[in-house]
Image (cartoon, rainbow, N blue to C red):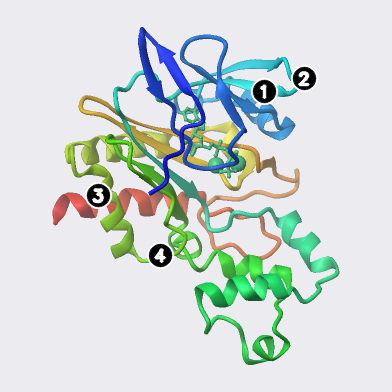
Amino acid sequence: IVQWTPFFQTYKKTRYPWVQLAGHQGNFKAGPEPGTILKKLCPKEQMCFQVLMKDALRPFVPEYKGYITTDDGELYLQLQDLLSEFSSPCVMDCKIGVRTYLEEELAKAKEKPKLRKDMYEKMIQIDSNAPTEEEHRLKGVTKPRYMVWRETISSTATLGFRIEGIRKSDGKSSKDFKTTKTKEQIIEAFRDFTDEFPDVIEKYIRRLQDIRNTLQVSKFFATHEVIGSSLLFVHDQKNAGVWLIDFAKTVILPSDVKINHGSEWIVGNHEDGYLIGLNNLIDVFAEMTKI
Ligand code: ATP
Ligand code: MG
Ligand code: MG
């Protein structure tokens, strides 16, 4: 059990522990205005938020309130705290897409592929059968090989999303989903996430459908490769919401490339599998309402 509360937040006279389910500790701070947080500024992400504030997707992303420099001289984005309207919320971060690295990161890793002993070690720690005979003999794997393999240990490569972390209303949290891969395992985790308030499943389905409809008309979505971005699920006794967060690896598509976010990714075609993940999420929640 991991408790990850980098700071306390105060909103409408209540004080609550803020929840961070992914990323580096130290990337987030309480915001200067009530109901806001600060995230370390990355220019790519800032660009995305600026565009998103004028896009059809605006209601589905945290409000971007500009950037500020803190006393220590660091730049931060000021964002709406999606937790502030909830009381003792359950929170889940699902990273969307069939891969979590950019085409350019894979291309760079392929430039001078050295055999990496550290990556081989990580690989056999998770699955001693993963390396080929030759890789076993050499006790090393290349970085591109490792990058592609790593997406197959969770549901990323197959379902187009993976669970990054879950926190329940009682404060118990887990980030132990690195090898949560099958639909059955996902359903088990989602069941646990929603067990106090099973009615939220229907609310999540409706909200995810709204997101899907809006993505179809979003200019931002049509022109970006969305990598490493998450859907943040938040619910309490009364309300439920889902928002798109984390655009640090979302990049504008080359002008001669069009993607539909639903086709298979083939190295170089820039497909991110965002809609594969979203559709599977909706299907999994829908299946849960039937059993
Ligand atoms: P990584 O790239 O490793 O996923 P990151 O540093 O880019 O991490 P984010 O993914 O944007 O950070 O956010 C990390 C976590 O912080 C999320 O999983 C979520 O729990 C929380 N979080 C981020 N943005 C918000 C927000 N606007 N409101 C509430 N919680 C947020
Ligand atoms: Mg993230
Ligand atoms: Mg990120």
Q: CA distance from mark 1 to mark 4?
A: 34 Å
Q: CA distance from mark 3 to mark 1?
A: 34 Å
Q: Earlier in the sequence, mark 4 or mark 2?
A: 2
User: What residue lies at 45% left-to-right and 22% top-to-bottom?
Assistant: 8
Q: CA distance from mark 2 to mark 1?
A: 10 Å
Residue that badge 3 annotates: 192
Name the residue type under label 1.
Tyr
CA neighbours of label 1 inside 10 A, class few (<14), some (14 to 19), many (20+): many
Q: Earlier in the sequence, mark 1 or mark 4?
A: 1
- Marks 3 and 2: in contact by CB < 8 Å? no
Name the spot of residue 28 as percent of width and height, x first: 58, 29
Name the spot of residue 5 as percent of width and height, x first: 46, 32
Left or right: 142 as drawn, with respect to 6:
right
Secondary structure of the residue carrying tag 4 is loop
User: What residue lies at 70% left-to-right and 16% top-to-bottom?
Assistant: 70
Residue that badge 4 annotates: 181
Q: Nearer the viewer, residue 42 or 98?
A: 42
- Marks 1 and 2: in contact by CB < 8 Å? no
CA neighbours of label 3 inside 10 A, class few (<14), some (14 to 19), many (20+): few
- Marks 2 and 4: in contact by CB < 8 Å? no
Q: CA distance from mark 2 to mark 3?
A: 42 Å
Up the image or down, 63 lies above or below 199; here it is: above
Dividing the image into four quarters, tell me where ligand 2 lies.
top right
Q: Earlier in the sequence, mark 3 or mark 1?
A: 1
Q: Earlier in the sequence, mark 2 or mark 3?
A: 2
Residue that badge 1 annotates: 76
Residue that badge 2 annotates: 73
Q: CA distance from mark 3 to mark 4?
A: 16 Å
